[in-house]
Image (tube, grey):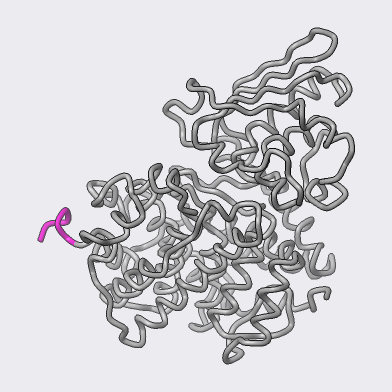
């Protein structure tokens, strides 16, 4: 068979098992792992993460793997579920606009668990992250935007296969075993955008990590699965409403071209849905330029692409989780206080009188000229009307933290330390940061959870 007629999973399996990962890809993965561990520590104190961790304590299997920031150990699947949920609990984890997913929460959660099972080092963890990222990117090019627009949460659907690829790589599986792992993962994949603004959204990231580990472990045990699970007549591409029904040329560059290097990862500098970030950036800049306050604002008009309203589904949020998926709330907070940070989505931030008073003055609507030839969620047209007749208007593509405006090492470090401080002491956070900065040379990934093994506050 030619490459074009090979089952998609055969091509993925060969790539995952045998590719050589370039240094540039490893460097990108290092920063992604660092950022994700930080947001996972921050998210570990959130109610959703605590509930999952509590259930893992009650129901978990053999104590083989670690939950970041906690003292107890649990089974590999439970550890991946807990860490993946924590990493996505604040919606502060990174984004990829090819897969339309938050890649790192499932990849890192599955990778940490599989690395502990395999007694692997940091370089192996980074390689596993990279192959999982690339599998997700190929699937994203084939399936999006249709898949995402129809209501599927790609962080969980595509993330399950990415997590399985990462786990299979760490467990040293050959190409045939990896194919089975990915086929099992395709059957497990799920996740709904209707969950946005509730605890189920971060749970779906955790489930992707857990299911990826489970798929790889079942494949290792000899579990059988269909090699056309992705591109068969009733496979993933068809069942989950992919834009295309076969790989086409989307996988031709596997092992040669690396999306993680060429396209990059979007690092979040605001703990809210990525679709809010171009607008937040613009409003913060306009506020500084025109020196207005909330009292000066008559109206804020935000033009977006047609996908954005399917994601930002709460115009009058009642909770912090809903606020993260509210353009109205994020815009009002940026105007009212000149910042959008973790405190914005705490109860006091959600009930803030100045922000709430601004909400009726914020309008979001679809602008047909926005998003043309751009990835969904990445462009906005923002206009601020002031009471004195002034008008500030700007069209923006992307935001700070995007690959075109990447955060500096100092900004990444500052974000990590601020996030980690929610769960561990400053000396522990600093030690973890130093370890992660040198992760490629670390001989055992298991040393990281030991380093941050402080009891998470009850």
- Position of residue 319 relative to residue 1, above or below, is above
Residue 229: in magenta span:
no
Residue 214: % across, % down = 45, 78
Helix, strand or loop: magenta stretch: loop
Residue at image coords 14%, 57%: 5
Q: Which quarter of the figure is the N terminus placed in?
A: bottom left
Q: Is residue 83 left or right of residue 451?
A: left
Quadrant position of residue 58: bottom right
Q: Which quarter of the figure is the C terminus placed in?
A: bottom right
Q: Between residues 443 and 317, which one lies in front from this camera angle?
A: 317
Residue at image coords 60%, 86%: 60
Q: Is residue 405 left or right of residue 208?
A: right
Residue 423: % across, % down = 79, 67
Q: Residue furthest bottom?
A: 62
Question: What is the span of residues highlighted in magenta in the rendered image?
Answer: 1-6
Residue at image coords 35%, 81%: 219
Q: Is residue 439 left or right of residue 143?
A: right
Count up the numbered dots. 0
Residue 155: % across, % down = 50, 56
Q: Between residues 126 and 223, which one lies in front from this camera angle?
A: 223
Residue 310: % across, % down = 53, 41
Q: Residue furthest left?
A: 1
Q: Residue furthest top?
A: 389
């Amino acid at each position: 068979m030619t490459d074009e007629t090979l089952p998609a999973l055969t091509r993925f399996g060969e790539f995952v098992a045998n590719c050589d990962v370039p240094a540039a890809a490893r460097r990108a993965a290092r920063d992604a792992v660092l950022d994700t561990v930080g947001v996972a520590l921050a998210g570990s104190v959130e109610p959703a993460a605590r509930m999952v961790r509590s259930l893992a304590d009650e129901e978990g299997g053999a104590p083989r793997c670690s939950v970041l920031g906690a003292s107890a150990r649990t089974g590999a699947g439970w550890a991946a579920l807990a860490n993946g949920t924590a990493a996505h609990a604040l919606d502060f984890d990174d984004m990829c606009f090819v897969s339309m997913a938050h890649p790192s929460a499932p990849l890192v959660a599955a990778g940490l668990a599989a690395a502990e099972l395999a007694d692997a080092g940091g370089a192996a963890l980074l390689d596993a992250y990279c192959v999982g990222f690339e599998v997700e990117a190929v699937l994203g090019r084939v399936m999006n935007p249709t898949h995402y627009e129809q209501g599927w949460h790609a962080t969980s659907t595509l993330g399950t296969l990415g997590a399985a690829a990462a786990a299979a790589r760490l467990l040293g599986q050959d190409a045939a075993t990896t194919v089975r792992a990915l086929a099992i993962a395709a059957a497990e994949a799920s996740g709904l955008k209707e969950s946005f603004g509730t605890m189920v959204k971060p749970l779906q990231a955790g489930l992707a990590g857990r299911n990826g580990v489970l798929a790889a472990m079942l494949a290792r045990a000899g579990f059988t699965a269909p090699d056309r699970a992705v591109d068969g007549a009733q496979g993933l591409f068809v069942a989950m409403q992919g834009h295309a029904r076969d790989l086409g040329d989307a996988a031709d560059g596997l092992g040669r071209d690396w999306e993680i290097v060429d396209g990059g990862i979007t690092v979040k500098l605001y703990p809210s849905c990525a679709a809010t970030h171009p607008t937040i950036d613009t409003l913060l800049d306009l506020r500084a330029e025109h020196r207005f306050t909330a009292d000066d604002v008559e109206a804020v008009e935000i033009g977006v692409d047609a996908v954005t309203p399917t994601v930002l589904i709460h115009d009058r949020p009642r909770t912090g989780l809903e606020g993260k998926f509210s353009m109205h709330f994020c815009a009002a907070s940026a105007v009212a206080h000149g910042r959008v940070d973790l405190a914005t989505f705490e109860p006091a931030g959600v009930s803030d009188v100045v922000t709430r008073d601004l909400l009726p003055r914020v309008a979001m609507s679809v602008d047909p000229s926005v998003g043309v030839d751009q990835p969904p969620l990445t462009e906005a047209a923002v206009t601020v009307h002031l009471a004195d007749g002034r008008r500030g208007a700007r069209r923006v593509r992307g935001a700070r933290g995007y690959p075109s405006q990447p955060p500096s090492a100092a900004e990444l470090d500052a974000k990590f330390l601020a996030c980690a401080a929610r769960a561990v002491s400053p000396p522990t956070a600093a030690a973890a940061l130093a370890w992660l900065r040198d992760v490629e040379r670390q001989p055992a990934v298991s040393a990281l959870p030991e380093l941050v093994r402080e009891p998470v506050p009850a």
